[in-house]
Amino acid sequence: MLSEQDIELAHPEAFDFAFGNLPAAKRADFNRHLVSCRYCQRIVDEYSEIGRIIKNLPPHVEPSADLEDRTVAAMVAALAEQRAGTDRRVDAEDQAATRVYPAPERQPSAEPETLVRPIPRLRPPAEDETRTRPPPVGHLAPMPLSIS
Amino acid sequence: MPPQYDSVDQALTVLTVDQALDKLPSIYGEVMRLVRDGFTHSEIAGRLGIPIGTVKSRMAKAAGTFRAELASLRGGDDAF
């Protein structure tokens, strides 16, 4: 942070140099001066980055006096055009919705459209096919014996 | 034609300083706008009718404000 004394003792060209506004014809002389002047060195060290940023700031543009009137007029015109376009579209949609179209005639087909096959009736199973006989209780089946 | 910026960081830096310029008291803001537009200290003094010493002190005050805004943007550490 520079003191007021630092700022007072620095040459004004140091500010022009730091902010990039020193004319090219004076730069060589100032560079020679800068080597030996610590006050100017401090200014350059302190403000050169800010100087570069300031040079990148967008230029201030003052809007013309009739900008507001022209903007409002353009908006009104755009809205009117948009509304007219909407009305035209609605009219076309209404006409399309209320138009009567003739129903297409139906051509008789040469073959029957559906063929219904009768479902075969289920045959009840024969009695022998379903009967199972449980083994008698307490009776063991004979085991095969093998004697070598 | 607006200037082109190389990075988001650069654009943000310029935006921060631009907003700080708008917030400056008018006596500092008018000096820095003339600096931005390329005027030298003697030309600014002549345009505003103020001494060169006053131009220097206003430049320093405004630049200090910009530095503080940028330090705040960069998380509080003064990287300058």
Image (cartoon, rainbow, N blue to C red):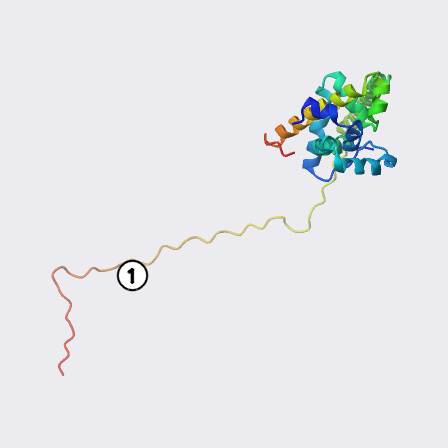
**Quadrant of the rendered structure where residue B20 is?**
top right
In percent of width and height, residue B50 lies at: 82, 16
Q: Which residue carries the number 1 mark?
A: A128
Give the camera-side residue of A50 and A102: A50
Quarter-of-image position of residue A76 = top right
The crowd level at tag 1 (other Cα within 10 Å; few <14, some 14-19, many 20+) is few
Q: Is residue B40 above or below residue A24?
A: above
Residue A1 image position (x, y, % from top left): 65, 27
| Residue A57, image x, y percentages | 77, 30
On screen, residue A132 versus residue B9, left or right, reads left
Residue A85 seen in the current view: no
Q: Residue at x 30, y 58 (%)?
A: A130
With respect to residue A65, does A21 lie above or below?
A: below
Expressed as whole percent of the image width and height from the top left, the position of residue B24 reads 71, 19
Q: Is residue B43 visible?
A: yes
For numbered disc 1, what is the local secondary structure?
Answer: helix
